[in-house]
Each structure stands twice: as structure tokens, then as C-alpha cells.
Image (cartoon, helix red, strand yellow):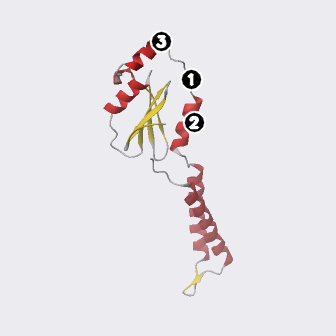
Amino acid sequence: MRKQSSIKWKIIGLFASLFIIWGGFSNELVFFKTDFSLLFIVVGSLYLLWDIFAIATHNKPQKALVDRSVMQTSVEPDAPTQEKATNAGSSKEVAFMREDRDTDNVWSIHQASCKADAMAFLSSHPVDRPHFYLIVETPEGNFGRDLHGIYQE
């Protein structure tokens, strides 16, 4: 559903940068009778720093959304809310809570009192850019919308 960069490629890059550094220190990498050992050490070190940064900031958006829903306390709906859920729902009943970001993604987090309100809100707010997610938290669960459509977490 969502395109995510895999951490396995970041780990492979980490090992590749270590291999480049090792090749520079071994003094066995000679091209056209010129010693490039120092160049390999510098370039390998830059790649190593980049790979460490990429692994440290690696974040899976789907896991982050699950963590947010686990941290949220569950609220039992009262009688008026249950009656309202049977109605068509109103996108005006949805309140903006916060906006979360990481290096690639933006989540606009909202809150609604029922699923019908969440679905009405998501239906009336199309998403037209990648890596942008509208999330509506309800007592019945979290619902979202991205470039591909509406979904339930």
C-alpha cells in the first residue's frame, strides 16, 4: 500500500562502505599504477557516515501509526455518539490535532467522534501528493487517506 525504503539496503550500504574503507587501508587497490588508498578511505568514510545517518533515521510510517494508536487511551462512546454513528456523518465534526513529519512523510492527524464522521471527512478531502497521509482517530479505530485512497489501519 505504501512505498517504504527497506532497511536491508541501508545495511548493505553500510557493509559496502566498510569494504571500501578496508580496501583503502589494505593498500592493495592500485589503478593505472596510481595509489588511490587515501581516496578510498575518505570516500568510504563519507559513505559510512551517510549509512549510519540513514539507519539511525530509518522510520517505518506504518509502525509509527500503530504506535500512536497504542499510546492513545480507549474511550467508550456514550449514547449520543452511538446514535450519531447511525447517521450519515459530517466532515465538520472532525478536529485537527497535530501534524507529524519524518524525512519523507507527513501525517495530518485529526480526531472524530465516530467512523461516519471520519469517512465523511476523508471522502471530502482528496490527497493529491505522495507521502502525505490524512489520519482520523476514532473510538472505532483509525482511518486514513493517501494518494491511493481511503483505508483502515
Cα separation between marks 1 and 3: 16 Å
Which residue occupies the foreground of this view, 106 or 121? 121
Which residue occupies the foreground of this view, 85 or 135? 85
Q: Which residue lies furthest to the front in this view?
A: 86
Number of numbered discs overlaid on the protein picture:
3
Q: Relative to 92, does residue 3 appear above or below in the rendering? A: below
Q: Is residue 87 left or right of residue 27?
A: left
- The answer to which quarter of the image holds residue 26 is bottom right
Q: Give the residue at mark 3.
A: 79
Q: Is residue 89 left or right of residue 67?
A: left
- Circle 3 — which element? helix
Q: Residue at x 40, y 27 (%)?
A: 118
Q: Give the residue at mark 2.
A: 67
Which residue occupies the foreground of this view, 85 or 145? 85
Q: Position of residue 133 (x, y in %)?
A: 42, 39
Q: Residue furthest bottom?
A: 33
Label 1 with label 3: CB-CB less than 8 Å:
no
Cα separation between marks 2 and 1: 14 Å
* Mark 1 vs 3, N-terminal side: 1
Question: What's the amino acid at mark 1?
Answer: Ser
Question: What's the amino acid at mark 3?
Answer: Ala
Q: Residue at x 66, y 71 (%)?
A: 22
* Mark 2 vs 3, N-terminal side: 2
Q: Give the residue at mark 1.
A: 74
Q: Is residue 76 left or right of residue 88?
A: right
Question: What's the amino acid at mark 2?
Answer: Asp
Label 2 with label 1: CB-CB less than 8 Å:
no
Q: Where is residue 141 in the image (x, y as percent from the top left)?
A: 50, 29
* Mark 2 vs 1, N-terminal side: 2
- Foreground disc of the pair 2, 1: 1
- Circle 2 — which element? helix
Q: Where is residue 137 in the image (x, y as percent from the top left)?
A: 47, 28
